[in-house]
Image: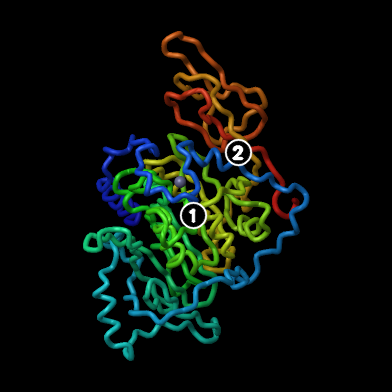
């Protein structure tokens, strides 16, 4: 119970740190100075890319997906493109992440780590499991110039080096290195700074892990876009969408540089990646994965997520999950709820599903109680409003709808005209706009129709 109480205290701190003054700021690219726009950078759309992401998706290759290999040894999840290990400058202090502290979201001062570094011969020895229990030993993880010893957990700091050096603000990276070998699972959230549910999903998942009982490593970056988070903004300070710039470039725009730094210094160490988002532009999503089901490794990976809707989407250029997959990392996007809100139900669904994933990957053993042990697979499309006005929905997130069913109305506040929006197929409402003022063309309802699961495909 105390954990629950504490959660709320932390949430309060998180929310208190937000300034809502810029929440309604809309991105205007026209006012960007010309020279800040890299000529070959992908064009950011002011349109919600989550809608475009679905509509531009390469169709699922029905019936031609190669049989999916069952999830076997975690080490088989192979990012073969990991950066070579370089000598670390320090050894990370071992922090008991289960022991909650008020500074839970702040980076550990580097001086504390440096002290340890001064006496490398006396480096703390990782607790070793009983030899009979598990002979293979985990290795030290070198990340962000720091050695994280097996059986320890710590907080590191990533700095993308784009700020005034004296004012640079390190972004916390939570690391748990297990006592046994296994995959490196990375969890990233708030690449869009106004998407809060994922921050809490990462916190609860990582802080609940015991390194002595973990196989592999979990690397959590709860707030990737720290500047956006502090301004309650989806975008970076230059109004670009960071999730259109991966894997980034060292000499490109601000977004390119931040993306490049995160990708090289953190993401390339991952075997598996779950990038957590929410709906945008006042749309909400049923807890769901976006995954390229045409990629056999990704399709297999989705099978570990308990009680998740899995929506096929090939993604767009510059998205973290696309860049990660291109680099040999098995990656999906998780969507949960809407931006600028903390939604307990959505957070629970995300945490629950990540725990089931870790258990299926052989990373933890919790006697996990499975609900509907399989995720449900969907193909999907968006239904748009044909008229401007005020949207009033007749359906709720998660509802099953029939073809032609009225999903909601757009009411013209001046003429009193009522325009129904009808479902264009039967299926389930996996995402929808909350009631608001809409213009003609606004994507209002995301309908998922059941698709075959990977092994049926
Ligand atoms: Zn997002």
Q: Measured along the vertical axis of the image, is residue 270 above or below residue 385?
A: below
Question: Given the current orientation, which residue lies at the most extreme right position?
Answer: 63
Residues marked 2 and 1 touching at CB (< 8 Å): no
Instruction: Please state which of residues 38 and 231 is positioned toward the viewer in this rendering.
Output: 38
- Which residue, given by chain and number where applicable, does mark 2 sit on? 55
Q: Where's residue 127, x and y in %? A: 41, 82
Q: Is the residue at mark 1 in contact range of ligand 1, meaning its CB lies under 8 Å from it? A: no
Q: Quadrant of residue 330?
A: bottom right
Q: Residue at horizontal 41%, vertical 41%?
A: 339
Assign the N terminus to one quadrant of the image. bottom left
Which residue is at 57% across, 55% downward?
Answer: 305
62 or 338, which is in the foreground?
A: 62
Q: Residue at x 38, y 62 (%)?
A: 207
Q: Residue furthest left?
A: 166
269, above or below 453, in the image: below
- Give the mark nearer the N terminus: 2 vs 1: 2
């Amino acid at each position: 119970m105390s954990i629950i109480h504490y959660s709320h205290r932390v949430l309060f701190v998180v929310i208190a740190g937000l300034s809502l003054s810029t929440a309604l700021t809309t991105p205007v690219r026209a006012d960007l100075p010309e020279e800040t726009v890299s000529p070959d950078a992908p064009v950011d759309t002011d349109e919600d890319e989550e809608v475009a992401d679905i509509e531009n998706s390469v169709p699922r290759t029905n019936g031609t997906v190669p049989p999916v290999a069952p999830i076997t040894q975690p080490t088989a999840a192979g990012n073969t493109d990991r950066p070579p290990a370089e000598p670390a400058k320090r050894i990370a202090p071992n922090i008991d992440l289960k022991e909650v502290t008020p500074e839970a979201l702040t980076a550990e001062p580097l001086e504390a780590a440096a002290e340890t570094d001064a006496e490398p011969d006396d480096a703390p020895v990782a607790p070793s499991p009983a030899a009979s229990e598990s002979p293979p030993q985990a290795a030290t993880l070198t990340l962000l110039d720091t050695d994280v010893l097996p059986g320890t957990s710590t907080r590191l700091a990533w700095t993308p080096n784009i700020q005034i050096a004296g004012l640079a603000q390190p972004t916390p990276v939570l690391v748990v290195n297990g006592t046994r070998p296994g995959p490196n699972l990375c969890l990233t959230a708030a690449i869009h700074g106004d998407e809060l549910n994922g921050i809490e999903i990462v916190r609860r998942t990582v802080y609940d892990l015991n390194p002595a009982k973990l196989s592999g490593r979990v690397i959590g970056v709860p707030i990737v876009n720290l500047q956006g988070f502090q301004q309650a903004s989806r975008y970076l300070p230059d109004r670009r969408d960071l999730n259109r710039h991966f894997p980034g470039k060292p000499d490109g725009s601000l977004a390119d540089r931040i993306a490049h730094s995160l990708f090289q210094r953190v993401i390339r160490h991952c075997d598996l990646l779950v990038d957590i988002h929410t709906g945008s532009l006042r749309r909400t999503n049923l807890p769901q994965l976006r995954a390229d089901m045409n990629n056999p490794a990704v399709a297999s990976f989705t099978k570990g997520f308990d009680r998740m809707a899995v929506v096929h989407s090939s993604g767009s250029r510059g998205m973290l999950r696309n860049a990660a997959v291109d680099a040999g990392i098995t990656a999906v996007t998780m969507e949960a709820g809407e931006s600028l809100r903390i939604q307990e139900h959505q957070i629970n669904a995300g945490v629950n599903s990540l725990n089931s994933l870790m258990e299926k990957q052989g990373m933890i053993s919790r006697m996990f109680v499975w609900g509907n042990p399989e995720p449900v697979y969907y193909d999907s499309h968006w239904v748009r409003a044909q008229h401007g006005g005020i949207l009033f929905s007749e359906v709720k997130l998660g509802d099953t709808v029939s073809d032609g069913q009225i999903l909601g109305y757009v009411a013209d506040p001046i003429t009193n005209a009522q325009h129904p929006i009808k479902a264009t197929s039967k299926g389930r409402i996996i995402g929808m706009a909350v009631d608001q003022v809409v213009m003609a063309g606004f994507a209002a309802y995301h309908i998922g129709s059941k698709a075959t699961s990977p092994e049926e495909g």
